[in-house]
Every structure is written in C-alpha cells, then in structure tokens.
Image (spheres, grey):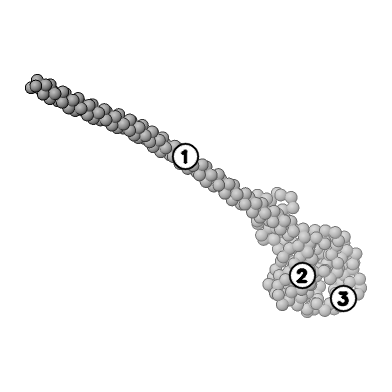
Amino acid sequence: MNNFNENKNNDLENKENDLSNQESYDHVADNSDENINVNEQGSADQENISEQDEGEAIEPDGSNNGDTIEKQEQKSDEQNKESKRKKSVLKEVLQWASVIVVALIVSLLLRSFVFEFVMVDGPSMQKTMFTGQRLVVYKLGYQFSFPKRGDIVVFKFQEGTQSEIPFLDNMPLNDKILPKKDEVDYIKRVIAVPGDKVDIRDGSVYVNDKKLVEPYAVGVTNAFSGLKFPIDKIPPNKIFAVGDNREMSSDSRMIGLIDISQVKGKAVFRIYPFDKMGSL
C-alpha cells in the first residue's frame, strides 16, 4: 500500500516535472522567436539606416554638383551679357562716330561749294549792312554763271598764311574747304562786268555812258588813285566792285579789278539781327 502511494506520488512528481519542462521549453522557444524577430528587425533597421546613409551621402554630392553647374551657367550667361553689352556700346560709339564724321564732311563740303556764313566787319557797306550782322553767302550759283551788276559778293582780298590744319596744306581744294585763319575777305557790290565801260566823275558812277541811280549808296563817289578812269572795257573774268559807303570803302577804285577766281559767293540772306532778317 505504501509502495503504491509512493509510486503514485512519484508519477505525480514526474508529471509536474514534465509540465515544468514543457513550460520551460515553450518559454525558451518563445524567447528564441522573439530573439529571431528582434534580430530580423535589427537587420532591417540596419539595412534602412545603411540605405539612408548611402542616399544621404550621394544626395549632397549631387546637389553640390548641380549648384556648381548652375553657378557656372549663370556666370557664363553674365559673361555673355557683358560681352554683348560691350559690343553694343562699341557699336553705338562707332555709329555715332561715323555719323559725326559724315556730318563733318558734309558740312565742310556744303561750306566749300554751296553756302557759307559770314559776319560783316567794317563800315564799307553801310547803310545796306552793318558791323556784326550775319549773312548767308551762296556759292554754288557762281559755279555755273557769272556775277551780275548789283550783286553783293564776297571775295578773297588777301591770301592767308596760317593753316587751320598744317598737314593738310597740300590737299587738293584745301583753300576752299579750310581757308587760312588770317585770310582777308571783302564784301562789295558789283558795278560793272566784262565788256562794260566804267567812268567816275562828278561824284557819280557811269556805266556804258549812263549815270547809275544808286539809292543804296552813301556819300560822294570819288575816283581815288587806284585806277585810271574811264575804263573803256572790263576785261574777261574781271568785275568792278565798290562798297555802298563810298567815302569809307576800300574797293576796286583802290585795289583794282577783281578776278572771278577771287569771288567766293553772293550774299543772299541776312540771318542776324533777327529784326533785320531777310533777303539782300
């Protein structure tokens, strides 16, 4: 009996031990699974971290390269813009320079062959014009025709010696384009032309034996001592010209006949003073 109980007790102990061992095994198995899950999660996290690190390591390099290329492109664009701006400025300067040069050439040609502005200096043409008045002298007309009686002409009385631009002295037509600084010009009225007979007597002028009616003349017309009157015939290419202020004018009566080559043009218009503006 006692043996039976002992055996029974031993069986119960063995069963309890088996249950305890089973629980221990289950617990170990659970812990193992948890450890496996933790390890797998750790590996996955490590992979994610590695990938993230790799991405972060690559991404800044790509961004820096992009920024560098963009800066280079901006710098290149700025350089191109600056180059274009400089070229545009240079082009504009050249255009203005060419305009100025062309305008200068045109103005010199106009002054030489078409018209010129002059200022009256002296009393020899009073009361027609006075010192300080500005006139327009038309030159082109005498290239195709000869001066007429009554024309008011500007002619070269004395050659100049001081050149405006010395190295252009030998240039053709230099005297017409750039007259010498000390050149002396006179302005007078044409009284007689080639073929005319001229005489001065009794304080008046006679052309072809006819006494001239001269409302523009001031004072008495005397012969002076330059020419011997009467002049039977004015030679070809010569004119006889005197000032309107007969007693205060140095003209053909003193300096002789004027060669047509000396005549620069005809005074046609007064531009100053403004209250006296008008044709002559």
Q: Amino acid at mark 3?
A: Leu
> Image point 76% across, 65% down: which residue?
137
Q: Amino acid at mark 1?
A: Gly
Q: Nearer the viewer, residue 255 or 37?
A: 37
Pointers 1 and 2 in contact (CB under 8 A)? no
Locate the C terminus and report the quarter of the image it occupies.
bottom right
Where residue 176 appears, as percent x and y from the top left, is: 74, 56
Displayed quadrant of residue 140: bottom right
- Dot 3: what SS? loop
User: Considering only vertical position in the picture, is 182 above or below 270?
Assistant: above
Q: Residues within 10 Å of mark 1 (few under 14, many from 20)?
A: few
Q: How many marks?
A: 3
- Callout in the foreground (1, 3): 1
**How many residues crowd mark 3 within 10 Å: few (<14), some (14–19), many (20+)?**
few
The front one of 239 and 200 is 239
Q: Which residue is tagged 3?
A: 212
Tell me whether circle 1 and circle 3 mark residues in contact (CB < 8 Å): no
Quickly name the residue at label 1: 66
Residue 157 at x, y percent in the picture: 74, 63
Q: Along the horizontal axis of the image, is 210 left or right of 262?
A: right
Residue 270 is at least partly visible in this image: yes
Identity of the residue drawn at 84% across and 71% down:
150
Q: Residue 269 shows which numbered tag?
A: 2
The amino acid sitting under disc 2 is Phe
The label on residue 257 is: none
Report x, y in % for residue 11: 16, 23
Of pointers 1 and 3, the one earlier in the residue sequence: 1
State whether residue 37 is above or below residue 109. above
Residue 262 placement, left or right of 57: right
